[in-house]
Amino acid sequence: MARVCVIGAGYVGLVTGAGLAELGHTVVLLETNASRLEALRLHQLPIHEPGLDELVERYAVRGRLTFSGSYSETIPEAEFIFIAVNTPTGPDGEANTTYVSAAVASVMKYARPKQVLVTKSTVPVGTGDLLSVVVSDAGFHDIEVVSNPEFLREGTAVQDFLTPDRIVVGAGSRAAAARVARLYSSLNAPVVVCSRRSAELAKYAANALLATRISFMNEMSAICEAVDADIEQVASVVGFDRRIGAGYLSAGLGWGGSCFPKDLRALSVTAKQHGIEPAMLDATVAVNARQRDRVYRRLCEAVGPVNGTAPTVAVLGLAFKPNTDDVRESPAIDIVRRLVESGIRVRAHDPVATGNARAILPDIDYCAEPYEAVANTDGIFLATEWDEYRQLDWPRIRELMRGRVIVDSRNALDGPRLEKLGFRYLSVGRRSHAAEQRDLMLHLESVPAGGL
Ligand code: NAD
Ligand code: UGA
């Protein structure tokens, strides 16, 4: 079992640290943000990630997962140093790698021979090569830099880390690749050993392809509306094709979050730096923006001005997706901002993300309960498909609201039922008579002998 230092206790660093402890290693999480560190030392998580608190608590209590703010105390002891710091968008769309460089510069002050430096952060192609130069300039010719990109999703991060589809190890030598791969040997997952540059690019390619699928389906959703078809049915049919698969086909408000937007921008910059016009990436981004505009316009047209005055809208969901408190580049936050800018009053609810949302948009009404948020509003905009919104008491909501409009930007609610309750239900890629169409949708294992 190895001694590992993970630098950066954010969404990826915390899951990586706790996950490696679960795999039997002894891990120190090195975090320079004082308030984060203080909370972690009290075993309080600075983020919401299902299942992570139990994992952190389990290994922190056993002493296999510790927290530190000191490079001098942690780096000399480690065999593997994982870089999991943030790589946000820079001024021209490129990935800002200054946090990575700063972390590596600090590591070099206390490094020891034969350590392995592993990049978990998503970094542009060639970053590993640049770090190798930094390492050898510091006099360490036997410290290898290995790329080990992370593919976890927020909201399911623990499960994703512990049951990955693949483990990618991009290294300059078979020996370094083997050392990193061995850290994961108790996981039953395929290991792809490749060049460091391929590993770095594959991370961006995976995110870009997933975003492209979503944009493609969002474009299909507009076509569905025009030709009177239903995007949910189209997605189901397409997804049954094993060559295509059923994931990432949900049309709606489009993609956001801390990674897809920044990673597509960064990959686009990389392409342009090499004289390649990233036509697919540009289209993926443009369709995403257009979809958000389309859904926003739908909301504004549906709620309209009420008796000549601006309406009030309840926004349900602020996180960029369910089961996280992350609001970075959240489509929901963008919609709220637009509503506020056009003079519409917003009452917002999210099960866990209001604290982070408030830091960005301090001046809207945040409500502790969805029922409080919908009271006396003219319309509801469901922006994030939290499960609890599916379970709401809709007859009660009808009584609490002033208007009847529901715009379900994630196709998450039971439209036919809401229509029966007297709501004006609008969704994405589905006509209002979609209820009848959906009744015709059957999934059978095979064609029954007696007919349908
Ligand atoms: P984050 O912002 O949640 O966490 C980064 C942490 O690093 C912060 O706590 C910050 O204080 C700390 N930090 C920054 N500089 C430091 C330094 N020099 N020393 C010690 N700590 C330092 O970021 P994140 O969402 O965890 O993403 C980290 C990286 O992983 C990014 O490159 C991202 O693209 C990639 N990634 C993220 C996800 C995800 O779902 N969030 C998934 C896969 C890959
Ligand atoms: C994404 C990738 O899925 C991870 O593999 C990757 O590790 C991570 O980015 C990263 O590099 O940070 P994440 O951003 O946590 O993970 O969340 P996703 O579940 O992929 O959702 C991203 C966005 O796409 C969300 O806004 C979500 O609402 C949207 N989405 C997703 C759709 O609109 N339709 C879908 O069918 C799926």
Image (spheres, helix red, strand yellow):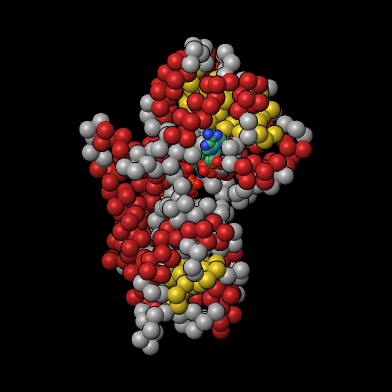
Residue 43 x/y as whole percent: 71, 44
- Residue found 40% across the figure and 69% down from its top: 339
Res 160 visible = no
Q: How many marks?
A: 0
Position of residue 202 in the picture relative to residue 318 (left or right): left
Residue nearest the observer in this picture, 244 or 90 = 90
Q: Nearer the viewer, residue 253 or 53?
A: 53
Seen at 49% across and 84% down, the residue is: 402
Q: In the rendered image, is residue 327 in sight?
A: yes
Counting from the top left corner in percent of width and height, residue 201 is at: 38, 31
Give the side of residue 223 with respect to residue 183, left or right: left
Q: Position of residue 116 (x, y in %)?
A: 55, 20
Residue at 51%, 30% in the rendered image: 103
288, 6: nearer the viewer = 6
- Point out the residue furthest to the right here: 62
Dividing the picture into quadrants, the one containing residue 307 is bottom left
Which residue is rendered at x = 32% and y = 48% of the image? 284
* Residue 299 figure quarter: bottom left
In the displayed structure, would residue 134 be above or below residue 400?
Answer: above
The one nearer the camera, 80 or 178, is 80
Pinpoint residue 234: horizontal percent, then vertical percent.
Answer: 38, 57
Q: Quadrant of the N terminus?
A: top right
Question: Does 125 appear above or below 233?
Answer: above
In the drawing, does residue 281 fall left or right of residue 161? left
